[in-house]
Amino acid sequence: MALELREVRAEIAGLVQRLLPHHSRTDKIDEVVQASGYSRHLIDVLRHRDHPWHRPTS
């Protein structure tokens, strides 16, 4: 179960990164925040590859 949850987090992190590259406009970021229910802070950090959610097996 824990591995499955880590894999789901990695998928979410990858999706956020694909939807919101570094040059994304603020309104697009806000749209993803609203649709996801995640905080703006979490969405911002998921846009970078060094966040732990990008590593499903760690």
Image: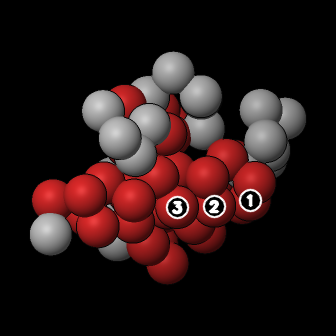
In the image, 44: left or right of 38? right
Report crowding for label 2: few under 14, some 14 to 19, many 20 or more residues within 10 A (C-alpha): few
Residue 31, relative to residue 47: is it above or below? below
- Residue at mark 1: 19
Tell me residue 57's x, y (percent).
35, 41
Q: Amino acid at mark 2?
A: Leu
Q: Disc 1 to disc 3, how far (Cα)?
A: 12 Å
Are the two marked residues, 1 and 3, in contact with CB atoms closer than 8 angstroms?
A: no
Tell me residue 41's x, y (percent).
38, 38
Q: Amino acid at mark 3?
A: Glu
Q: Residue at x 44, y 28 (%)?
A: 51
Q: Amino acid at mark 1?
A: Leu
Helix, strand or loop status at disc 3 = helix
- Residue at mark 3: 11
Are the two marked residues, 3 and 2, in contact with CB atoms closer than 8 angstroms?
A: yes
Q: Residue at x 57, y 66 (%)?
A: 32
Looking at the rendered image, the disc whose residue lies closer to the viewer, 2 or 1, is: 2
For the C terminus, give its image quadrant: top left
Q: Which mark is residue 15?
A: 2
In the image, 49: left or right of 39? right
Looking at the rendered image, the disc whose residue lies closer to the viewer, 3 or 2, is: 3
Helix, strand or loop status at disc 1 = helix
Residue 54, relative to residue 20: is it above or below? above
| Residue 41 in view, yes or no | no
Q: Disc 3 to disc 2, how far (Cα)?
A: 6 Å
Looking at the rendered image, the disc whose residue lies closer to the viewer, 1 or 3, is: 3
Are the two marked residues, 2 and 1, in contact with CB atoms closer than 8 angstroms?
A: yes
Q: Residue at x 39, y 59 (%)?
A: 7
Helix, strand or loop status at disc 2 = helix
